[in-house]
Image: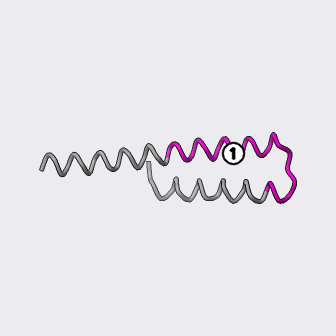
Amino acid sequence: MDIQILTMWVRGRYEALKAGKEAGQTSTELALIAGALLVGAGLLVLAIRTKLAEKIGIINGG
């Protein structure tokens, strides 16, 4: 997973959530956007943990 792509995607969902709240979208629509934002954030955390584990493995193994 590419960290930069995930970061941009999460930022996009956050902006959509802010814009939706200001535009008066229904709570169901906002909940869907918030859910997608949480999934993206979880994937971003997983990608960062994987990248760090690779770096630690390289340092310990080499």
Query: Is disc 1 placed on a helix, strand or loop?
Result: helix
Residue range highlighted in magenta:
20-43
Disc 1 crowd rating (10 Å Cα; few below 14, some 14-19, many 20+) is some
Task: Report how many numbered discs are placed on residues in the image.
Answer: 1
Q: Is residue 33 left or right of residue 44?
A: right
Between 41 and 5, the one lying in front of the other is 41
- For the rendered model, the colour scheme is one colour
Residue at 71%, 46% (x, y): give it.
Answer: 33
Q: Is residue 19 left or right of residue 13?
A: right
The amino acid at mark 1 is: Ala
Quarter of image, res 11? bottom right
Q: Mark 1 points at which residue?
A: 34
12 vs 31: above or below: below
Residue at 20%, 50% (x, y): give it.
Answer: 58
Residue 59 place in picture, x, y as percent? 18, 52
Residue 43 place in picture, x, y as percent? 50, 43
Magenta portion: prevailing SS class: helix
Q: In this view, does 19 lie to the left or right of 14?
A: right
42 vs 15: above or below: above
Is residue 22 part of the magenta span, yes or no? yes
Residue at 75%, 41% (x, y): give it.
Answer: 31
Residue 41 place in picture, x, y as percent? 55, 47
Residue at 24%, 48% (x, y): give it.
Answer: 56
Is residue 38 part of the magenta span, yes or no? yes
Residue 46 place in picture, x, y as percent? 44, 43
